[in-house]
Image (cartoon, rainbow, N blue to C red):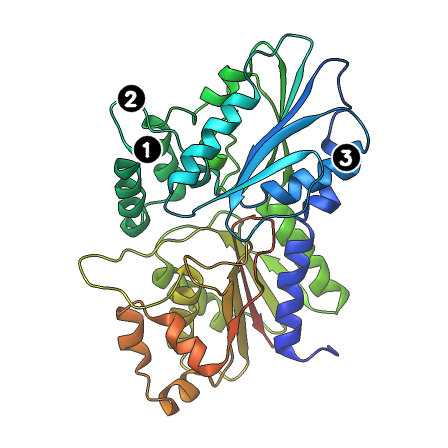
Amino acid sequence: MEDDTPDFLRGLFRAAIAAADPAAVLARHLPPPSAGKNIVIGAGKAAAAMAAALEAAWGDAAYEGVVVTRYGHSMPTKKIRVLQAAHPVPDENSVLGARALLAAVAGLTAKDQVIALISGGASALAVLPAAGLTLEDKQILNKALLESGAPIAAMNRIRKAVSGIKGGKLAAACAPAKLVTLAISDIPGDDPALIGSGPTFYAGADFRLIATPAMALDAAANFARERGVKAEILGDALQGESAALGREMAARALAAKSPVVLLSGGETGVTIGDQKPGRGGRNTEFLLSLAIALGGAKNIFAIAGDTDGIDGTEDAAGAIITPDTLLRARDQKFNPEQTLRRHDSYSLFAALGDLMITGPTLTNVNDFRAIFVE
């Protein structure tokens, strides 16, 4: 392999993200404009990029609309308004965003068409508390869910139950217009009812998945094979505790026949408990656990990151580990095991210069992990 190993790992990550780029994948799933009104709505970390891709495909057609994305994830658009709100805990702009979506689809007829652009993050970005609840109630709930370590599917089922827009309620507001949803999945298993908590999903909905974790892993596998490296996809929906998955993956890597790259996706969790946590996200926690379990194995490298470019609430997508990660960490006066128990993995990788900082990628197909047994 001509590339050095860290560059090879970064190339795998870039290939996965490119496979989920709205500019590359949205147009072929997009229906033509209708003869009536064409309204575009959307929410999620990829919403602005999806809106820009739609505008490129539809050109000078007659349409208007509004989408809500995370702060810093906006893109220039001509006809579709882009609003920004907080993630992962909603703020006042999340409520304003939800109301703007509902206002955009009010009063439509059967001759009209609504295109909904939904991606991961929509749950926090478009928030309308159900009757009897306040924004503060939703903020407290979201924070508790994020710290619980619960699977994303369970979180989104709870979020739907306390929302005035999720769980198909936005779809109901679009009636009787034709509704087509284009979605980028960040949900293990790609359940359309759970992507963004399913604001436009209902039984029989025209719901089109334009990018998924499996597609991203396939692209990374092809990248590896083109460079003469065998690739094994271990699954696109792995869940559980980040640290536990790190130990499990270390055992698989130590038993693997080299050279091979082990690819996986999904969304793990980190249960914080009562202690005050350090800095970190589920991907850097996975990597630190993996490095500890590998014990400095001389031929194993790994990368892990959130494909939206932000691991939890930090500014890094993830990080890279090398055979000397533990040695270098101890040289920097870190105790890796104690750091893992404090959930302070970001601080360790920052000190080593091994964080992967991409900025917002404007897509989101969940976590990406690659372990290279050289």
For the residues marked 2 and 3, what is the alpha-carbon distance in whole angstroms? 39 Å
Task: Determine which quarter of the picture holds residue 166.
Answer: top left
Secondary element under disc 1, as helix, strand or loop, is helix
Q: Amino acid at mark 1?
A: Ile
Q: Does the rendering let one see residue 117?
A: no
In the picture of the structure, the residue carrying the numbered disc 2 is 131
Q: Is residue 327 above or below residue 130?
A: below
Going 26% across and 69% down the picture, which residue do you hit? 341
| Residue farthest toward the bottom in the current orientation of the protein | 331
| Residue farthest toward the right in the current orientation of the protein | 60
For the residues marked 2 and 1, what is the alpha-carbon distance in whole angstroms? 15 Å
Residue 308 at what x, y percent from top left?
A: 55, 53
Horizontally, residue 195 falls left or right of residue 339, namely right
In the picture of the structure, the residue carrying the numbered disc 1 is 158
Quadrant location, the N terminus:
bottom right
Horizontally, residue 54 falls left or right of residue 201, namely right
The mark closer to the camera, 2 or 1, is 2
Residue 184 at what x, y percent from top left?
A: 59, 40
In the picture of the structure, the residue carrying the numbered disc 3 is 28
Secondary element under disc 3, as helix, strand or loop, is helix
Q: Amino acid at mark 3?
A: Arg
